[in-house]
Image: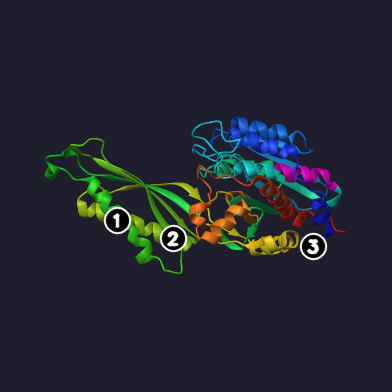
């Protein structure tokens, strides 16, 4: 590893402006597609740096391009939307908006990317090339990255040599977790409409009951993974919505099921979706219902880390973080980050960082109750341990980018 990386990080200390920005974001969360004020905060923060700002791209998307001579183009992405969750963390800077919360750490991601920009701006003598900071809205609904791509992202910014992304998760605060290959699951949601025939509740023989058919579908769906997907493969089918009827004495005319699916393989995904459609059509036919309709939405691509990028970056993670650079486990959650490198045909690495207070993590480990004691992403009491998390997130963003941008000594 070149000493350029250690020199850039040697004097690093968390700065007051970072905490002020982070808490300002945390207090005023905005949901996917509504991030107008958050985008304004980011744009104001970018005024402190010598970079070209391109905005808006795809709704409230923002890209800051920091050029520093000849060299690779490295893109780092941070998302900045919040969730429809009412906060219950007890933080003095808790969300001031009921029903909205940064319960997934996107405020931390955004702060860390701004922090990395500040270090690249301050230490231009240590690197050469172009650093591209991409601030993405609407990650939680799986739409933001693709909206930016559709709005001409590839024509508006330099083509990246490599793309990078990170996400905080439950784990010892400051620990950096990376891996090659499939790191986060591909996902889709499927809306299924089953049409029957309505009748009075006292005359079920005059109906074609879609509720009954829907109930059979839900039961049969649970057997697909256990009986049609190999034990060595991974797949999840979760029924998130089951709607049918609105009164106590009427058999409804239709039922609605919304299913969420996750896999680590395109082959498994194709087999899974074919089985879902077969089961639904079969149950509808058995009940005498009309042919069902299917609508696929909320697509999340497979996050599949390039092994060569992983090997290069991981060597520097190990050098900087020592024993706190670990190999990640596959994440069953999903991300839309991969849509950005896919638009450029660029390789990428996406890693995670622990954000749980270490004392709490140790207590949970000793009690064998991590799942019960440790708040995880999307929970109302999810709150990163700020100091070690922002330090690790900032350093990891710098180390990964400097793997490519460091000036030859």
In terms of secondary structure, where does tag 1 sit?
helix
Q: Kindly identify which residue carries mark 1.
A: 219
Bin the neighbour count of mark 3 within 10 Å (Cα to Cα): few under 14, some 14-19, many 20 and up. few
In terms of secondary structure, where does tag 2 sit?
strand
Which residue is found at the position 49% from the left and 62% from the top?
Answer: 265
Q: Kindly identify which residue carries mark 3.
A: 1
Does residue 309 appear anywhere in the picture? no
Whichever of callouts 1 and 2 sits on the residue coming sooner in the sequence is: 1
Q: Where are the magenta residues, as a range?
A: 114-124
State the image coordinates of residue 78 (x, y, percent, origin top left): 64, 45
Are the residues at dot 2 and dot 3 in contact (C-beta closer than 8 Å)? no
Query: How far is the residue under mark 1 from the one under mark 2?
Result: 17 Å
Colouring of the image: rainbow
Query: How far is the residue under mark 1 from the one under mark 3?
Result: 55 Å
Whichever of callouts 1 and 3 sits on the residue coming sooner in the sequence is: 3
Q: Is residue 116 magenta?
A: yes
State the image coordinates of residue 304 (x, y, percent, origin top left): 58, 59
Q: For the C terminus, give its image quadrant.
A: bottom right
Which residue is found at the position 69% from the left and 33% from the top?
Answer: 43
């Amino acid at each position: 590893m070149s000493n350029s990386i250690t020199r850039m990080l040697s004097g690093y200390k968390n700065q007051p402006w970072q905490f002020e920005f982070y808490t300002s974001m945390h207090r005023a969360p905005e949901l996917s597609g509504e991030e107008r004020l958050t985008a304004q905060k980011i744009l104001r923060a970018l005024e402190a740096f010598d970079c070209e700002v391109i905005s808006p791209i795809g709704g409230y998307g923002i890209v800051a391009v920091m050029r520093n001579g000849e060299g690779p183009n490295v893109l780092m992405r941070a998302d900045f939307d919040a969730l429809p969750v009412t906060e219950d963390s007890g933080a003095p800077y808790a969300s001031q908006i009921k029903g909205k919360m940064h319960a997934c750490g996107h405020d931390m991601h955004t702060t860390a990317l701004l922090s990395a920009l500040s270090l690249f701006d301050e230490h231009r003598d240590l690197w050469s090339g172009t650093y591209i900071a991409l601030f993405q809205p609407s990650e939680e609904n799986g739409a933001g990255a693709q909206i930016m791509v559709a709005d001409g992202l590839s024509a508006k910014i330099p083509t990246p040599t490599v793309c990078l992304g990170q996400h905080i998760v439950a784990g010892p605060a400051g620990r950096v977790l990376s891996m090659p290959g499939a790191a986060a699951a591909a996902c889709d949601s499927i809306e299924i409409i089953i049409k029957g025939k309505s009748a009075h509740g006292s005359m079920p023989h005059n109906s074609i009951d879609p509720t009954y058919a829907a109930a059979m579908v839900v039961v049969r769906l649970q057997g697909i993974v256990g009986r049609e997907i190999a034990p060595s493969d991974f797949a999840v089918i979760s029924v998130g919505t089951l709607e049918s009827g609105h009164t106590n004495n009427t058999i409804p005319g239709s039922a609605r099921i919304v299913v969420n699916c996750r896999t680590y393989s395109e082959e498994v995904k194709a087999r899974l979706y074919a089985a879902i459609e077969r089961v639904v059509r079969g149950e509808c036919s058995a009940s005498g219902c009309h042919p069902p309709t299917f609508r696929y939405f909320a697509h999340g691509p497979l996050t599949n880390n390039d092994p060569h990028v992983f090997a290069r970056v991981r060597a520097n993670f190990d050098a900087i973080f020592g024993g706190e650079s670990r190999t990640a486990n596959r994440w069953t959650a999903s991300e839309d980050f991969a849509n950005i490198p896919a638009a450029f045909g660029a390789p990428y690495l996406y890693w995670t960082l622990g954000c749980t207070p270490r004392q709490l993590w140790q207590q949970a480990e000793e009690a064998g109750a991590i799942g019960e004691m440790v708040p995880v992403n999307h929970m109302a009491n999810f709150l990163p341990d700020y100091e070690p998390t922002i330090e690790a997130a900032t350093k990891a963003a710098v180390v990964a980018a400097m793997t490519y941008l460091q000036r030859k000594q």
